[in-house]
Amino acid sequence: MQRPCGPRNAAVLLLLALLAVTGLLAGCLDNLCKLRLYIYRDVESKSLPPADMALLIADPAMVAALLPGAASKINQGLPWAPAQPAYASDFYQLSIDGLDGRRLYQGRCLNVTPSYVCEVRPGSRQIMATMKLMGPWGQQQATDNAAVTLEPGGVYFLHPDWDQAGQKTLRLQAERLPASYDATLRAKLLEWQRLHTQGRSLDN
């Protein structure tokens, strides 16, 4: 004889259903974040047209791919660190953490990921960044909160002061590149992100 489902059993079943839906949603959101279908930005509000925003790039490979004419003009004192277990010489990576005391908006991603490019509102801003240094001696991190003035439509390469980086200290520099942030560059950036996201191509 089957016993009727009491209030306690119904509550347990409802809780299990909610947990299953939450787990499924979390997995979907995490997968969407990994696809990098959008550009990280400084606030949750929808981005303005590119000409009314400023673009910050920390990864020199992005500059070389998107703006080859400007790549030869950037000042790079250390090579960007590739993904590998050990390093025979000194390398660095620089991530953009936030602006004006607030972390970058990464959509509804549950896991915060390093940000090597983002679009932000122009004007007087405080950029928070983290530098990771790698070498045969190990790894070390340093942070900075630098005041910069960003122009509408400007494209900026963010990098450490190389003399200070040699002392394992981050003094953030924002180098204006000879390029304008427009709809064409934004489309190229989105395509680059999709192509260079692990496990993702434009065909899938």
Image: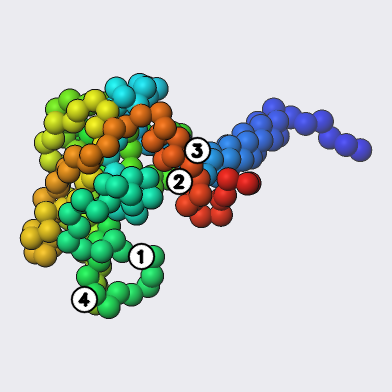
Number of residues whose C-alpha sits closer than 10 Å to that of mark 4, classed few (under 14), some (14–19) or many (20 or more) = few
Q: Which mark is residue 128?
A: none
Residue 183 shown left or right of residue 131 in the figure: right
Depth check: give the residue in front, 95 or 49. 49
Lower sequence index among marks 3 and 4: 3
Disc 3 residue crowd, few under 14, some 14–19, many 20+, Cα 10 Å: few
Q: Amino acid at mark 2?
A: Trp
Q: Which mark is residue 82?
A: 1
Specify the farthest residue to the right: 1
* Residue found at the very far front of the displayed protein: 69
- In the rendered view, would you say 10 is above or below 64? above
Asked whether, in this view, residue 124 is left or right of residue 136, the answer is left
> Marks 1 and 2, how far apart in space?
17 Å
Alpha carbon of mark 4 to alpha carbon of mark 2: how far? 33 Å
Mark 3, residue position:
37
Instruction: Give the residue displayed 36% in from the left and 22% down from the top.
Output: 49
Give the CA distance from mark 1 to mark 4: 16 Å
Residue drawn at 11 percent across, 54 percent down = 161
Where disc 4 sits, the SS reads loop
Q: Which residue is mark 4?
A: 137
Asked where in the image residue 164 lies, by quadrant, the reply is bottom left
Q: CA distance from mark 3 to mark 4?
A: 37 Å
Q: Position of residue 147 (x, y in %)?
A: 11, 36
Q: Are marks 1 and 2 in contact (CB under 8 Å)?
A: no
